[in-house]
Amino acid sequence: MEKVVVGFSGGLDTTYCVKYLTLEKGLEVHSVIVNTGGFSDEELKKVEAHAYALGVKTHTTVNAVKGYYDSIIKYLIYGNVLKNNTYPLSVSAERLSQALHIAEHVKKLDAKLVAHGSTGAGNDQVRFDMIFNIMIPGVEILTPIRDLQLSREAEITYLKEKGVEMNFEKAAYSINKGLWGTSVGGKETLNSKGMLPESAWPTQMTKEGASEEMVIGFAHGEINKVNGQSFAHPTEAIQYIQSIAGAYGIGRDIHVGDTIIGIKGRVGFEAAAPMVILKAHHALEKHVLTKWQLSWKDQLAQFYGNWLHEGQIMDPVMRDIEAFLEHSQENVTGKVFVQLMPYRFQVIGIESSYDLMNSKFGKYGEMNAGFTGNDVRGFSKIFGNQTIIWNAVQNENKKD
């Protein structure tokens, strides 16, 4: 019996893949779940039990949380990356980490087939296919959902007919949870208008009428403390921030984006920790970096985020940009004060020994300590000299 490795999450699509490949194709299915921060130990045990109940030969759990941060998320924070100024690349980033680990599992089992549950209308199919083609060339890629052009309703009907037991009401929404946020797709996001109902959000808002201050500490661009508490690894700090900010319903939105395959799409997401961290980190950077550091960082980070979104994590240019981003964080050290409120938050300010907004050099709009009014008068003439010359030439030519 031929072996196939299935990237498995326990959701509707991958559940269908396991059942279909086992019953309809007669394959020996080996499932693997790559945890990028979206599953607790208890949830992972339930996914494993679900996989074996479906009939897999083996099931493997890969803990990729720290590696996911070290290789991808860290640079998204350094770059303050938000796709279309909205989306923190929650699923986009984790799919790449998952694809790389699934490919390694295929090598380990010496399988000739690999399968994923992507549809034919989204980005994930390209990300998985491309990385598999790079990492495990020659291995055949099976995509039942895409090939059969199945709707969620058709998948549910098939699984019910085969006696599969799972929460099909919950399966009405496609939920992808990870360290860097959770995406939520459903019938409301299939059209250009519509908002997800409160019940669809995985994290419910429980802090109605409450408010609290959070202090986030950064050392060279990485989180090292939250409210005075230290963490062994930044992933623990991210999860801690999520546990607090998520209860306020912060970071919910609908992202409208251009897919890799050329169509536009909408997806809901909740990303309390990512949104708070990115805004806090950016606020600190605006105080400690120079104008041109910020400018070039923004340009490179935008490209980095777009190229990552399109699955190009293996492109060597990404290592070059990562080196730039890493070096830019040398002085990004200090505390950021954030006020959390229901459905929103506000950055109150920062404290840093590297703060360039230093009163001994002057106060914006009030006074300066490093130059005189006459210095500014002369500088203004020189700074605008080329435009002064241009205007003079234009006026002379108009006379002619």
Image (cartoon, rainbow, N blue to C red):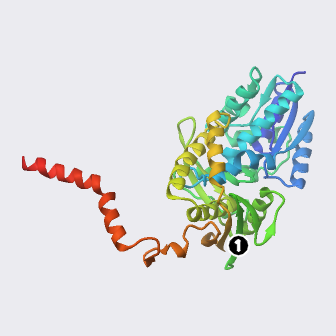
Q: Residue at x 78, y 48 (%)?
A: 36
Q: Do we see residue 186 in this rendering?
A: no
Above or below: residue 214 compared with residue 399: below
Q: Nearer the viewer, residue 66 or 106?
A: 66
What is the x, y in percent for residue 373? Answer: 35, 73
Above or below: residue 208 compared with residue 76: below
Q: Residue at x 73, y 72 (%)?
A: 206
Q: Which residue is mark 1?
A: 214
- Mark 1: secondary structure: strand
Q: Nearer the viewer, residue 6 or 67?
A: 67
What is the x, y in percent for residue 293? Answer: 54, 54
Q: Would you identify the image quadrant in which residue 269 lies?
A: bottom right
What is the x, y in percent for residue 264? Answer: 53, 43
Q: Nearer the viewer, residue 3 or 299?
A: 299
What is the x, y in percent for residue 387? Answer: 27, 53
Query: Could you tell whether 375 is left or right of 310 in the image?
Result: left
Residue neighbourhood size for the residue with mark 1, other residues' Cα within 10 Å, grouped as few (<14), some (14–19), many (≥20):
many
Q: Do we see residue 328 in this rendering?
A: yes
Q: Nearer the viewer, residue 20 or 249?
A: 249
In which quadrant will I find the N terminus? top right
Q: Residue at x 80, y 35 (%)?
A: 102
Q: How many marks?
A: 1
Type of residue at label 1? Met
Query: Could you tell whether 143 is left or right of 34 in the image?
Result: left
Q: Would you identify the image quadrant in which residue 213 lies?
A: bottom right
